Image: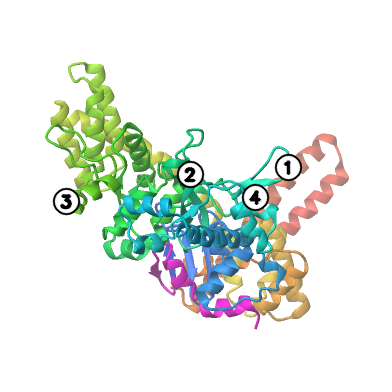
Amino acid sequence: MDQVEQIKNRINIVDLLREYIELKKAGANYKALCPFHSEKTPSLMVSEDKQIWHCFGCSEGGDIFGFIMRMENVDFPEALRLLAKRAGVVLKRQDPALTSQKTKLMDILEASASFYSAELYKSQSALAYLKNRELTDETIKQFRLGFSPDSWDSLLKFLKNKGLQERDIALAGLINQKDGGGFYDRFRGRIMFPIFNHYGNVVGFTARVLPQFDDGKMGKYINSPETIAYKKSQILFGLNFAKQEIKKEDAIVVVEGNMDVVALHQAGFKNVVATSGTALTNEQVNLLKRYSQNIIMSFDADAAGLQAALRGIDTALSYGLNVKVLEMPKNELGEPIAKDPDELIKKSPEFWKKAISRPKDYIQFIIDSCLPKYNFENSHDKDLFLNEVSDQITKIKSSIKKSDWIRKLSELADIDEKILREQILKKDKKQQEKIEVAPLLSEATKTGVDLKYISLLLSDVDKYSGVLKEISADMLKNKGIQEFYRHLILYYNDNRAFELNKFKDYLESVGKDHRILDKLFMLKDRDYSDYKEEDVELELKSLVLNLKKSYTKEQMQILEKEMMQAEKEGDKEKVGEIMEKFKRLK
């Protein structure tokens, strides 16, 4: 048994996918909302029996490797490495297929993190800085904080001594090329925060300059550049440490800065992750929703933090998450008592504990953030305010909650509740039309008679092989399905028996992708899972009849056009030939 099969045998596809999406039982299979496109009705099906998955909305599908490659945006060698680690399978490192460029870079980044960690304990000033930030030895070690010496090539020499190539070190974003040739360390005289993916692998660094090395020319914080190992929009700092606590609390707290995460974790608040100074991205929300549907935004108490929070709310809502906002507590003058969570936790963990226990509903947060911008004495301003807030109210799924906010908003703006309700219902209707129409049309097209016919035929090709003579490939409308069906007929005529694995091998031998079989099997399971054997037979006969009728009708229409043309040209011989074709069709 090869390593791929070993891994497949040790990992149940249902258990794996449950870590990413919510699966619900559907007969013998499972269904879920597809993570690869936006939808409201589950179209992704998972077969535990066949250990495959398929989405009927976007046509993605495959096995555990295909899912991880798509979900984690990795190539096959990286998916193999990740799943081997999960399955406890030791990979043969001499296999060249396993040494992908991404794997090389992650090995370099891991070695660099170890180097920086060791250097921290050689620098009194670096350690003193972290101690002044009130970080304990335990926290420093947990987050693997380090220090990059104020040297042009200390890391470069260290990595080259380990036999690593300059080209690969540069691709990992750790060194820069000099104008005159050669390389130098990117990070110098800085506290190093390793950035981990959610598996706990080092993929990059955030570096904070020590005050004595700050010449004002470089930023206080600099990050690793984007590489094939590090895509900033896909990473949430601290998620690898927070996953279990998020599941336990069933809530995710999203902050801006890496130090916010470190400080909060040290204080015992561990369901916290950071966007590293940006607004939430689609990829980050898609990652977060694997662990909880409840998100609490806690961005910095400044204008940039407000804008980042507002953008993050929209993104989270578009993925159906429940959103609340934690604002910094205010003093008697209405001013925030801290600029960010790190500063607040240092004043007292009790401040944070109290604030996190009563976050604002996102609608209230939006109302509060909009009020200072508008003058209600001005009807135009009031209209702009109502439009801005009502746009957010349309995103509320609960009818009761939506009605409650319409009432509150009408009282706040002193406007007739009935008028406001009608305005919001109109927006609701437009939004619903945008969301629903395209997927319905797409789904109707993709689940046509061709696919249903072949999916039922494949349930027992030997038993229903007679229909292979009744239905030719030309009778099918879908060109891709036509080609697949021709190969099915050729295979069966040669073998006189159907074996799935042999048919897959045959498809590969003629250069055809056998993954369409997954879709066909899943289609049968989705639409006919509760059919008895005799019901399947009757349905197949009905589909055969429909295909014949449809094909005959199309051919008759073609012949009618040809007949009209032949008569117009006075071609009696051609007319006679067409008449014979008519008779044969009838």
Say whether residue 552 is magenta.
Answer: no
The CA distance from mark 1 to mark 4 is 13 Å
The disc placed on residue 170 is 4
Among the two numbered marks 2 and 3 on one chain, the one whose residue lies closer to the N terminus: 3
Q: Residues within 10 Å of mark 3 (few under 14, many from 20)?
A: few
Among the two numbered marks 3 and 4 on one chain, the one whose residue lies closer to the N terminus: 4
Q: Name the spot of residue 574 as percent of width and height, x first.
A: 85, 45
The CA distance from mark 1 to mark 3 is 56 Å
Residue at the disc numbered 1: 181
The CA distance from mark 2 to mark 4 is 45 Å
Q: Quadrant of residue 79?
A: bottom right
Q: Name the spot of residue 280 as percent of width and height, x first.
A: 40, 45
The disc placed on residue 354 is 3
Q: Say which of marks 1 and 4 sits in front.
A: 1
Quarter of the image for the C terminus: give it: bottom right
| Type of amino acid under label 4 | Ala
Among the two numbered marks 1 and 4 on one chain, the one whose residue lies closer to the N terminus: 4
- Residue at (52% x, 51% y) in the render: 149
The CA distance from mark 3 to mark 4 is 46 Å
Helix, strand or loop at label 2? It is: helix
The CA distance from mark 2 to mark 3 is 45 Å
In this rendered view, identify the residue nearer to me: 449 or 563. 449
